Amino acid sequence: MRSENKPSGQRSFIEEARRAQIAASAVEVLAEVGFAKASLAAIAKHAGISKGVISYHFAGKDELMEEVVTRVYTEITEYVITRMEGLTTAGEQLRVQILSVAEHMHGHRNRLLAVWEIFNNLRDADGRPRYGAHTSEDLYLLLESIYDLGQRTGEFRAFDKRVMAVTHTAAVDAMCGYWAATPGYDIDAHARELADLMDRAVR
């Protein structure tokens, strides 16, 4: 049985470690040469394994790309949620959500570049983008929960929570994108300015 056909809880430690190794190599190859040139052969060479090993763990390139996105976004989400723990006001949560994304980017530029390559190129069976606004519902709901808290406590003004969530998400994505494309850019300063901007928008 291929590993990818097993629920994650049924995979051995060795299988999980191999999948993580392959995904990590995929990140580096994607960041270096882009989606089109990030073949399974190139990823296998980077990982120091045979292409057949990748084929054992993943049904194909598309599944491997999805694994990369899942791992990268899980890391970001866990980091942000941890930073937000214990914060009691919506304003604090809103600010820390933005600042912690920027904090997590340090040392993870290649992961961001890899995810962008996937977002811009991976298509579903009908030729439509695999990722986009239609796959961001969990993030929108998280942000809406912050806005809802602020509106219920009177800390935030009345506004359409979905409009704000979409705008908020796009602004954070743009921040990360500009940082990745601009060596030496101060993403922390950008995050502070963006947090101030969003704070003024919801008051």
Image (cartoon, rainbow, N blue to C red):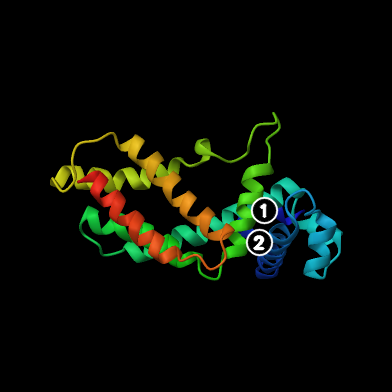
Q: For residue 162, which quarter of the picture? A: top left
SS at mark 2? loop
Q: For residue 72, which quarter of the picture? A: bottom right
Q: How many marks?
A: 2
Q: Amino acid at mark 1?
A: Lys
Badge 1 crowding class, 10 Å Cα cut-off, few under 14, some 14 to 19, many 20 or more, is few
- Can you say whether 173 is above or below 159 in the image? below
Check disc 2 and report the residue beneath it.
Answer: 11
Q: Is residue 105 left or right of residue 155?
A: right
Q: Is residue 203 left or right of residue 22?
A: left
SS at mark 1? loop
Badge 2 crowding class, 10 Å Cα cut-off, few under 14, some 14 to 19, many 20 or more, is some
Q: Amino acid at mark 2?
A: Arg
Q: Is residue 183 left or right of residue 136?
A: right
Picture coordinates of residue 26, whole percent (x, y):
71, 60
Q: Earlier in the sequence, mark 1 or mark 2?
A: 1
Report the residue at 38% width, 45% height from top.
Answer: 168
Tell me the distance, in whole angstroms, between the alpha carbons under discs 1 and 2.
6 Å
Report the residue at 45% width, 63% height from top.
Answer: 187
Nearer-the-camera pick, 192 or 72? 192
Most extreme residue toward the top is: 126
Picture coordinates of residue 81, whole percent (x, y):
38, 60
- Can you say whether 27 is above or below 131 in the image? below
Q: For residue 167, which quarter of the picture? A: top left
Check disc 1 and report the residue beneath it.
Answer: 6
Report the residue at 36% width, 41% height from top.
Answer: 165
- Can you say whether 125 is above or below 25 in the image? above
* Mark 1 touches mark 2? (CB < 8 Å): yes
